[in-house]
Amino acid sequence: MLLNFDVLGLICSSLTERPDVLSFSVTCSTLHPLAVEVALSMDPIVIYSEHTVQKLHAVVFADPARRAPHIHALDVSARVSSLPIPSREFMAVITGQFVALLEHTTTLRWLQLAINEQYFLRDPSVLSAIARLRGLRTLSLRSIHSDAPSWIRTIQSSLRTLSIADLPGGFWTPASVTTCMARFASTLEHLALAKLRTVRQPLPHIIPFTAVLSLVLDKMRELPELECLMRLFPNLVTLSCDARLDGYADQYFINTRERNLEVQERRSWRYLDWVACRTETLYGLGLKCPVRHLVIDNSPARLWNDLLADSLFQNAPVHLRLSMNVQEFALEGTTQLQEIFPREGSISHLSHLVLFVPYDTSLLSAQGRTLQDIWYLLVETLLSESQHLRLTHLRLVLRIAVSPNALDEHVAQFQDSASVLDLDPSAMSLTHAVQSLRYLFLALGVLFPGHYWHADGRFAEGERWALSKAWKSSNGVGDWPWQELSRGLSQHIINEEESTLSEEDEAWLRSSERSRAQGSGSQSRAANDAER
């Protein structure tokens, strides 16, 4: 049966991977122009080096009127090292080609740059061409130069999303944010900044960014002052704050919290729904409003447990994702996981709990714990700490990293214990203890060091292993048997119920599960070969 061009075009347009589209384009010369347009429209086009600029320029300018309008996103933040440094003449050619691309891509909506990583991005003509892009809606600056604030003021588009890396040798202040970004005050919805310094003195000239709903603060060196943040961004829905405050005394957190609590007598974030930060930051913020979704890093665990308990009591989260890095020497009795959840009060609203526990083990002695020992200690503590909670969804993820200094024979024993671990008994215990549970997700992953030999002679190079299971209550109560869920369905429910880990941790877990599956397949094939 022959397929007409329209059918082939529909097939080509439905492909989702650029290599597939390019392969499809060689099926016939008539289909090639359409396939190129589809490939260009896939987001984003990544420019790794000056040579990538040359190739993209050649493709687009073979038919600029038809091809340029299909480019919607460019990522110019990665770099493949090229030595020696390109000549000045070559860079002039590349700069001209990139400016020409920008001038023709009037439909460009998304742009990510690393100005300090790409030589040609430093040219004033390139920066001017970017500033003239009127249709740009998302701009991400992963590395910038010290003159970036002046350049940002020249941008003519009405940005919706702006992400800016830290200024070399400097920091952002309320005044510099207002001066630099005043043009976007009524359109900007998502803002990410590094090294913002909030201040306590009067702020008479601040322009409120009323459209900003999402704020990400990175590399903070001090606790945020809510007086400043609430005036700058009065309508926040989500707030993420990465602050490293290890050198501060306890009184600093107490004083800042008192000021922030006092500010909230006059104003508050009425729509705040999602907050991500470390435990000490959450305590210092002193948020008095309920926050439906909290993402908390409580590392090192136990040090801040009392602060975390106070914050959970005050903020009454419905969804809580808690990361706790547990040290091996302190796991005995699992004191690091105790006394986190208040026994009474607002914590009763908590229905979704995601507990992510990274754990490092040395395995230096023959008395080292097996994987079962570590897992059951964690589950036992969770049982005692969660019985009073009214959870409907619980996800527990344990990630173990075995020290590179571990003795080979102990690593092999630890791996053997992993192969016989059964999650079902833990699931039964948890569902009996927390009668309100309707969904349960258990997972653990192990990263083995890459220096020991298996008993069968195979050398393990950074081998990863993971096991996960999920269950759903089959009768609406905690009684067993529960229905085990497929991997696809469990992941769908995790996504729908906002019970995911960070993107990095989810990717690690998936890749570890694939490694385990591939390892099991290899062992099965080896056994079959031996039988034959």
Image (tube, rainbow, N blue to C red):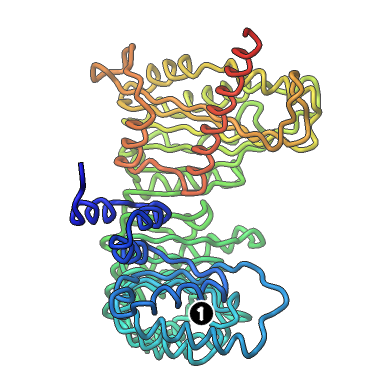
Residue 377 occupies which quadrant of the picture? top right
Graded by Cα atoms within 10 Å as few (under 14), some (14 to 19) or many (20 or more), the crowding at tag 1 reads some
Figure quadrant of the C terminus: top right
Q: Residue at x 23, y 56 (%)?
A: 9
Residue 406 horizontal side relative to residue 525, left or right? right
Residue 138 in the image, given as x and y percentages of width and height = 36, 72
Q: Residue at x 33, y 76 (%)?
A: 68
Residue 5 horizontal side relative to residue 51, left or right? left
522 or 404: nearer the eye? 522
For badge 1, the amino acid type reads Trp
Residue 211 horizontal side relative to residue 21, left or right? left
Residue 497 occupies which quadrant of the picture? top left
Q: Residue at x 52, y 86 (%)?
A: 95
Residue 512 occupies which quadrant of the picture? top right
Residue 187 in the image, given as x and y percentages of width and height = 27, 77
Name the secondary structure under disc 1. Answer: loop
Q: Residue at x 58, y 64 (%)?
A: 252
Q: Which residue matches tag 1?
A: 172
